[in-house]
Image (tube, grey):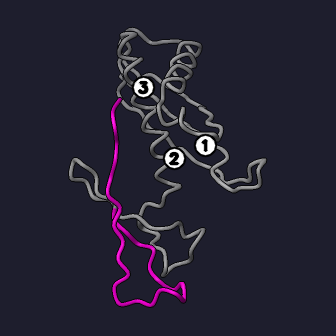
Amino acid sequence: MASYGCTVEWSRGDEPFSDRKYSRAHRWHFDGGAVVAGSSSPHSVRPPYSDPSAVDPEEALVAAVSSCHMLWFLSLAAERGLVVDSYSDAAQARMGRFADGREGIAEIVLRPLVVLSGGNLPDDAVMDELHHEAHRRCFIANSLRSEVHVQGSWRAAQA
């Protein structure tokens, strides 16, 4: 099986630490060379100790689920001979409390809008089936204990 990783780096610098007034800004380094600015969510730690312009772990989780679903959907659509022109997802997550009392991402809602063109346009049932299968195959969604809902829509490209 494949193995995945990244390096997460944080440094205190000259700031105090034990007073909890330290920056949560850090960097994610990925094997392909991408570097992403990370931070705690400003919902958890107020600025200036968090960086609202950086990606927080909760946003990264939503993006990972959305990206994984999209990649599977595109693959499955191509297998069916569909022509996907674009795919956009306004994904969101909701924090909540689990039965064991711990707090976490309780729900993720994917709202993909797929634009299709060509003569082989599917009906809603086929699109629902593709989203269902993409969700079933998504490695990230399969790794979560929270619910992931897909509320997809599609339209034909304008001629």
On the rendered structure, is 69 left or right of 6?
Answer: right
Find the magenta span and give its range. Answer: 1-27
Tag 1 or tag 3, which sits nearer the N-term? Answer: 3
> Do residues under tags 3 and 1 come within 8 Å of each other at their CB atoms?
no
Tag 2 or tag 3, which sits nearer the N-term? Answer: 2
The secondary structure type at the circle numbered 1 is strand
The secondary structure type at the circle numbered 3 is helix
Q: Position of residue 5 (x, y in %)?
A: 34, 48
Name the residue tied to disc 2: 62
- From the image, which quarter does the C terminus lie in? top left
> Which residue type does callout 1 highlight?
Ile
> Which residue type does callout 2 highlight?
Val
Tag 2 or tag 1, which sits nearer the N-term? Answer: 2
Identified at 60% across, 68% down, the residue is 43
Mark identifier at residue 17: none
Q: Is 155 above or below relative to 60?
A: above
Q: Residues within 10 Å of mark 1 (few under 14, many from 20)?
A: many
In front: 1, or 45? 1
Name the residue tied to disc 3: 72
On the rendered structure, is 11 left or right of 100?
Answer: left
Q: Position of residue 100 (x, y in %)?
A: 76, 50
Q: CA distance from mark 3 to mark 1?
A: 17 Å
Name the residue tied to disc 1: 108
> Do residues under tags 1 and 2 come within 8 Å of each other at their CB atoms?
yes
Most extreme residue toward the front, as rendered? Answer: 1
Q: CA distance from mark 3 to mark 2?
A: 16 Å
Identified at 46% across, 83% down, the residue is 22
